Image: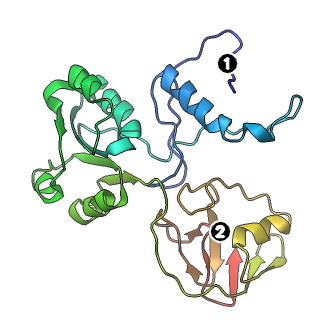
């Protein structure tokens, strides 16, 4: 399924950074060029195309950029396998801006290898990255971007300063939490109290009660459903690292019997 612009012209577009501080997402459209962006959009749409019928209206939001390229004078990009897809346009944008940029790419196969060599020459290295070595040689202002399999991301998180590392995950990490229990969500502004059963998410309970909380991944990685809480102790289960006073109701629950939300 294809949704071309009416005049067959599509301006290059880069989504602005998400208002959430997001470092992981299962879905991304990070290309800075027209053709890959359209291809990515088509790839996403064909997965839901069987729900669509002529005449059906769709609510479509603007793209969300949860893996933005923050302006810097120097970058280190690390990609594993298909993780090169979001990194490739970042490398191009960094070089085009005049910043110093190095890319390390590893995997059983190296997609875009010829293209990378042709465009970036000695800026690109192929092979398994030694994270400790890369971290030891990191410049004082270098920003690090990493996308690939979980072992690579875990190694990067162990090696690089957290304030300069940005990662994108394909899926949430496997972690163990306490058994889910029921609790109440007190919505301070509306005056409603919403019961949350043990077998439902806080997000679903709020939506069932009539609160139109936006959502995307429902796995705690995209940041779309961020809410502010005022009282209680949430159990954060997201991959983002919720800021103080924030939580992601698609996965997060409450350690206390009541959790007060700014709703």
In the depicted structure, whether residue 143 falls above or below residue 175: above
Please rate how many residues cluster around mark 2, counting C-alpha atoms within 10 Å: few if below 14, some from 14 to 19, many from 20.
many
State which quarter of the image contains the N terminus.
top right
Q: Tell me if residue 51 comes above or below residue 250 in the rendering.
A: above
Q: Can the viewer see residue 2?
A: yes
Picture quadrant of residue 93: top left
Could you tell whether 245 is left or right of 45 in the image?
left
Distance (Cα) linking label 1 and label 2:
35 Å
The residue positioned 43% from the left and 42% from the top of the image is: 68
Give 260 or 58, whichever is nearer the viewer.
58
Horizontal arrangement in the rendering, residue 124 relative to residue 28 (left or right): left
Name the residue rendered at 28%, 37% in the picture.
Answer: 110
**Residue with the most extreme bottom position:** 257
Q: Which mark is residue 4?
A: 1
Task: Kindly identify which residue carries mark 2.
Answer: 249
Q: Position of residue 260 (x, y in %)?
A: 70, 79
Q: Secondary structure at mark 1?
A: loop
Q: Which residue extends farthest top? A: 7
Which residue is found at the position 31% from the left and 61% from the top?
Answer: 151
Work out whether residue 62 can be spotted: no
**Is residue 240 found left or right of 199 in the rendered image?**
left
């Amino acid at each position: 399924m294809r949704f071309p612009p009416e005049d067959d012209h599509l301006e290059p577009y880069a989504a602005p950074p998400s208002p959430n501080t997001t470092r992981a997402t299962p879905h991304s459209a990070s290309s800075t060029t027209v053709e890959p962006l359209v291809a990515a959009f088509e790839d996403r749409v064909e997965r839901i195309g069987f729900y669509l019928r002529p005449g059906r209206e769709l609510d479509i939001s603007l793209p969300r950029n949860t893996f933005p390229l923050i302006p810097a004078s120097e970058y280190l990009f690390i990609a594993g396998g298909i993780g090169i897809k979001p990194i490739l346009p970042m490398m191009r944008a960094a070089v085009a801006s005049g910043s110093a940029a190095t890319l390390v790419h590893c995997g059983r196969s190296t997609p875009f290898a010829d293209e990378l060599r042709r465009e970036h020459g000695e800026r690109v290295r192929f092979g398994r990255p030694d994270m400790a070595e890369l971290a030891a040689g990191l410049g004082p202002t270098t920003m690090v971007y990493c996308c690939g399999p979980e072992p690579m991301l875990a190694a990067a998180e162990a090696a690089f300063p957290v304030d300069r590392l940005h990662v994108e995950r394909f899926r949430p990490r496997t972690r163990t939490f306490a058994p889910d229990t029921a609790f109440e969500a007190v919505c301070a502004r509306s005056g409603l109290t919403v019961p949350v059963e043990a077998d439902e998410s806080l997000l679903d309970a709020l939506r069932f009660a009539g609160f139109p909380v936006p959502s995307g991944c429902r796995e705690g990685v995209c940041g779309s459903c961020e809410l502010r809480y005022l009282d209680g102790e949430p159990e954060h289960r997201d991959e983002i690292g919720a800021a103080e006073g924030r939580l992601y109701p698609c996965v997060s629950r409450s350690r206390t019997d009541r959790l007060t939300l700014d709703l």
